[in-house]
Image (cartoon, rainbow, N blue to C red):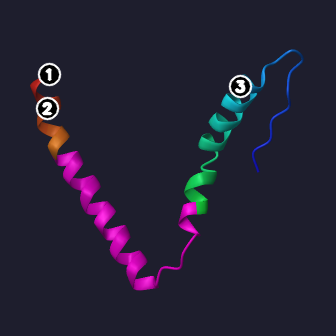
Amino acid sequence: MAEIRLHEGESIENALRRFKRKVMQEDIIKEVRKHSFYLKPGEKKRIKQALARKRSRKKVRREPQEDRK
């Protein structure tokens, strides 16, 4: 759980900004979205495979650009 303590003389806006940054670093939002609805095991597998394909296509696209440098 993300928790911050207010520093002496710190504004609420700065504290809120620090809190949001901490939440993003701890991937709390990602976990909440992940558990917000049930996925069947087959659906999870399909999504995982689709993400792997997407990553591999992105990797292939980047390789030729690195060779040119």
Q: What is the three-letter code of the residue carrying label 3?
A: Glu
Q: CA distance from mark 2 to mark 1?
A: 7 Å
User: Is label 3 or label 1 in front?
Assistant: 3
Tag 2 secondary structure = helix
Position of 3 with respect to 54 (left or right) is: right
Disc on the earlier residue, 3 or 1: 3
Taking 29 as reference, is 67 above or below it?
A: above
Question: Residue 6 lies in what quarter of the image?
Answer: top right
Pointer 2 with pointer 1, Cβ within 8 A = yes
Residue 39 or 54: which is nearer the viewer? 39
Q: Of label 2 and label 3, which has the lower sequence position?
A: 3
Q: Which mark is residue 13?
A: 3
Q: What x and y, as percent, mark residue 69?
A: 14, 21
At a point 71% along the width and 23% down the height, the residue shown is 14
Residue in the image at 80% along x and 35% along y: 4
Instruction: Report the residue marked by disc 1.
Output: 69
**Proximity of marks 3 and 1: CB atoms separated by less than 8 Å:** no
Q: Which mark is residue 65?
A: 2
> Can you tell which quarter of the image residue 16 is in?
top right
Residue 54 x, y percent position in the rendering? 26, 57
Q: CA distance from mark 2 to mark 3?
A: 42 Å
Amino acid on which disc 2 is placed: Gln
